[in-house]
Image: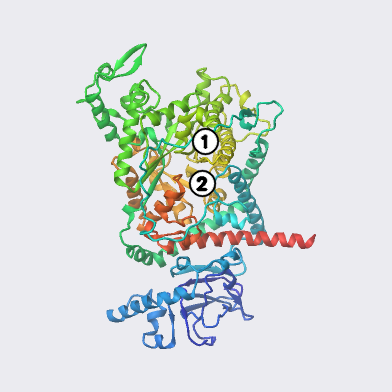
């Protein structure tokens, strides 16, 4: 290894209060750890040896191995002891390798091992008083002003750090180019998130020196006794809501995007609710698409992702037992009783097939004479519907329902959609799985309430159900809200997302609408009206309190032209039968939602997020749309083919709701799913069920998803709890509810935001994830800032 070689250091952060020990050329290397600060990752001596800076009274003893390469330089690997701060007298009574090598197989009597553990416990408090966790102080010096908080202290664990002049492994020119492009891409996403009131990670925002903040305040850390893990149960009806006064503003669509005008005068300027215009979006899309095809950038991102994966494998090898020990030390908390959110599940298929069969039989037994549909102008009771199919309750079986996906649905989205029709009958789907039918969705409301009851019984499982708004008519929102309120379809364990299917071509072919603008009018105009004049639209206003965002759904593998230019046909003039491309749908959903969010925020109302199906199949440009405009996405399978986007999704900590069982039946075999790689690299992934009716067998489909993933990919308890925590973080449940589930300060960065007594995620894992992200961001922004300084000095 050359004089400018790199150092691989596994450090346990031991510190000893004893006199300084001179280092001889033949003595073991003495490594010092200054709170894992990049400033003290080491300086090279003239002879090429790597010697770390020495702090008075803070000395780490480590058994270190030096390997000399052809250039005479020394590479050092050290594994140091536990979190101890010992005096000379303390050390005198123990064997030398008791402290320096706790990772070794024990070779002494059990009494000595117990003595060592007791010593560690006694000195933990002293160590916590002396040290305070701080990472990369040159990036966020404000941490220096924070008062000491014992929970800001990181549990000691074995870290792997790479140091040297250049740790990226690519030529400097490529590194500078990659840094410039990645920073530009992060700035783009930050702009789109800020303009739409969606979230952007604090850590990355701080590196961007952004003024964008979430507006969420932190509270003093409280114990579970002071701040219970279970939110208080609501005692009054969820539909008793304060109604703001009407504003009577004028809402008009301008080039496909609704804007708010104070008066109805034609010359009035709209309220200043800014959003990215279509030409700007097209330009940003084209820049991102050229970026993901850039050769040197692809190589750089691939290397960093490979490094992150390998780093995680090392972390698991070194710290798996410590993580497990941390979990075992927490009373009354394990994987079964931590909060989990099914972040991607459709309401029409949220029950399993046995539940649906049981519900159909029960309804047929109790409500056989109730009129449920009208066929060719003739009202039909439920009994008559089954008589027309020559069926009785005795004949019905799960196999006859035929709603489960099988090997014939692989890459056949049309066959999969047909599985939504029980027994192949669209009439049964209309009766039992629709909100808008002859019974006004009474059966669907009842089965949703049964599913919600199962969630409440399990207590720790929650779901974000997707309900459909097709955009076919202007009263869809009113009917949906009335269905929820009249049927009292509400649970503390459930929130709603509105999915908008991309079906304009079918509506146009059937002459249901004249232009694409009608879909936008039918989807967004009622929302603006309810925000503007809630007293005139009370049902929609009340229902929107429990809606958290929008989803865009359909078969992504349909052929389309993924890119368009700035002079694309506006929605009002899109009158042909061709379906607009994915990016067209997403942009107009995003732009209208951005204006709506600003309008609602100005009134103190809840805002929405965009969480589309993205990257399940089709062109990778869908993932570019998701990167720019979506807070979270569902699926994201194609990220495995685009290292640049995958690395950007990591840096921006974009949530990805993955459904391996769903993918296994439709697009990608289970063993080829990239989920374990995403998790190892540090992407914010969560497990979700998608469609339990089609893919799952048990009463708890989310637990079924977790259990299969754990068995196939050998996930540890820590991995499972990390996934559950991710699912809560990326969910749309209220901030106050998340404070009960994750801790009052869950929005803080790193270990300070983790409460193991609620999440069962060890601080070791949270610290590892946080430090890895800081390393990657520092690696990029350091080069970018140097370039800026160099350019400024030349001016």
Q: Secondary structure at mark 1?
A: loop
Q: Earlier in the sequence, mark 1 or mark 2?
A: 1
Q: Are marks 1 and 2 in contact (CB under 8 Å)?
A: no
Can residue 398 be seen here? The reply is no
Residue 640 disc label: none
Horizontal placement of 668 versus 585: left or right? left
> Could you say which is closer to the camera, residue 161 or residue 147?
147
Horizontal placement of 139 versus 725: left or right? right
Q: Position of residue 63 (x, y in %)?
A: 45, 79
Q: Secondary structure at mark 2?
A: helix
User: Quick one: quadrant of the C terminus?
Assistant: bottom right
Q: Name the residue tied to disc 2.
A: 639
Residue 244 disc label: 1
User: Quick one: quadrant of the N terminus?
Assistant: bottom right
Figure check: 628 above or below 201: above
Q: At 48% across and 67% down in the image, what residue appears?
A: 149
Horizontal placement of 557 versus 368: left or right? right
What is the C-alpha distance between the residues marked 1 and 2? Answer: 44 Å
Q: Position of residue 754 (x, y in %)?
A: 44, 59
Label 1: how many residues lie within 10 Å, few (<14), some (14-19) or many (20+)?
some
Where residue 257 sits, quadrant-wise, is: top right
Figure check: 381 above or below 502: above
Q: Residue extending furthest right?
A: 795
Q: Position of residue 473 (x, y in %)?
A: 50, 22
């Amino acid at each position: 290894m050359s004089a400018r070689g790199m150092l691989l250091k596994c450090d346990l952060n031991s510190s000893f209060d004893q006199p300084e020990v001179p280092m001889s050329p033949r003595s073991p290397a003495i490594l010092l750890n200054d709170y894992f600060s990049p400033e003290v990752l080491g300086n090279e001596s003239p002879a090429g040896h790597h010697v770390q800076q020495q702090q008075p009274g803070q000395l780490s003893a480590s058994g270190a191995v030096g390997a000399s390469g052809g250039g005479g330089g020394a590479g050092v690997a050290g594994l140091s002891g536990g979190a101890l701060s010992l005096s000379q007298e303390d050390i005198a009574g123990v064997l030398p390798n008791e402290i320096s090598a706790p990772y070794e197989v024990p070779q002494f009597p059990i009494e000595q091992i117990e003595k060592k553990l007791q010593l560690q416990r006694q000195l933990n408090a002293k160590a916590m008083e002396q040290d305070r966790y701080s990472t990369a102080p040159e990036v966020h010096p404000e941490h220096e002003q924070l008062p000491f908080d014992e929970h800001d202290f990181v549990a000691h664990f074995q870290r792997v750090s790479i140091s040297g002049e250049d740790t990226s492994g690519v030529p400097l020119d490529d590194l500078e180019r990659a840094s410039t492009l990645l920073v530009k891409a992060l700035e783009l996403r930050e702009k789109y998130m800020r303009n739409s009131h969606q979230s952007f990670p604090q850590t990355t925002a701080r590196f961007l020196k952004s003024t964008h903040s979430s507006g969420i305040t932190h509270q003093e850390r409280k114990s579970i006794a002071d701040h219970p893990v279970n939110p208080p149960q609501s005692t009054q009806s969820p539909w008793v809501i304060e109604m703001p006064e009407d504003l009577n503003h004028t809402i008009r669509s301008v080039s496909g995007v609704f804007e708010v005008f104070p008066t109805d005068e034609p010359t009035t300027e709209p309220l200043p609710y800014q959003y990215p215009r279509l030409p700007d979006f097209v330009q940003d899309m084209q820049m991102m698409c050229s970026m993901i095809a850039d050769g040197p950038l692809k190589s750089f991102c691939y290397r960093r992702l490979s490094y992150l994966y390998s780093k995680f494998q090392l972390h698991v090898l070194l710290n798996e037992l410590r993580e497990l020990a941390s979990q075992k030390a927490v009373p009354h908390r394990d994987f079964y009783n931590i909060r989990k959110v099914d972040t991607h599940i459709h309401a029409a298929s949220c029950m399993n097939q046995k539940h649906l069969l049981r519900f159909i039989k029960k309804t047929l037994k109790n409500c056989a004479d109730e009129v449920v549909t009208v066929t060719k102008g003739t009202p039909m009771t439920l009994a008559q519907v089954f008589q027309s199919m020559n069926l009785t309750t005795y004949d019905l079986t799960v196999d006859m329902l035929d709603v489960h996906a099988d090997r014939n649905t692989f890459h056949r989205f049309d066959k999969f959609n047909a599985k939504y029709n029980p027994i192949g009958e669209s009439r049964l789907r209309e009766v039992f799985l629709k909100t808008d039918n002859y019974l006004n969705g009474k059966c669907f409301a009842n089965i949703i309430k049964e599913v919600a009851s199962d969630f409440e019984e399990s207590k720790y499982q929650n779901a974000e159900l997707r309900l459909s708004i097709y955009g076919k008519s202007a009263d869809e929102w009113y009917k949906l809200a009335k269905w929820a309120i009249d049927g009292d379809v509400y649970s503390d364990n459930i929130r709603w997302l509105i999915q908008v299917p991309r079906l304009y071509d079918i509506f146009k072919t059937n002459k249901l609408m004249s232009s694409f603008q009608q879909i936008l009018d039918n989807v967004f105009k009622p929302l603006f009206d309810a925000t503007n004049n809630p007293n005139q639209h009370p049902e929609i206003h009340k229902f929107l309190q429990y809606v958290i965002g929008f989803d865009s759904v359909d078969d992504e593998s349909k052929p389309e032209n993924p890119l368009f230019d700035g002079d694309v046909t506006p929605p009002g003039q899109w009158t042909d039968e061709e379906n607009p491309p994915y990016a067209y749908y997403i942009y107009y959903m995003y732009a209208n939602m951005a204006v709506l969010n600003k309008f609602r925020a100005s009134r103190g109302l809840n805002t929405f997020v965009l969480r589309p199906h993205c990257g399940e199949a089709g062109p990778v440009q869908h993932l570019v749309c998701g990167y720019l405009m979506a807070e979270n996405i569902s699926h994201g399978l194609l990220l495995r083919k685009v290292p640049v986007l995958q690395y950007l999704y990591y840096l921006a900590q974009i949530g990805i709701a993955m459904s391996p069982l769903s993918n296994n039946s439709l697009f990608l075999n289970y063993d080829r799913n990239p989920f374990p790689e995403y998790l190892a690299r540090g992407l914010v992934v969560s497990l979700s069920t998608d469609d339990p009716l089609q893919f799952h067998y048990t009463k708890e489909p989310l637990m079924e998803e977790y259990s299969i993933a754990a068995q196939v990919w050998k996930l540890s308890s820590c991995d499972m709890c990390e996934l559950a925590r991710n699912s809560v973080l990326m969910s749309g449940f209220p901030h106050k509810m998340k404070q009960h589930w994750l801790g009052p300060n869950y929005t803080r960065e790193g270990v300070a935001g983790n409460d193991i007594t609620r999440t069962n995620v060890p601080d070791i894992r949270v610290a590892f994830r946080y430090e890895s992200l800081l390393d990657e961001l520092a690696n990029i922004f350091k080069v970018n800032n140097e370039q800026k300084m160099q350019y400024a000095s030349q001016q």
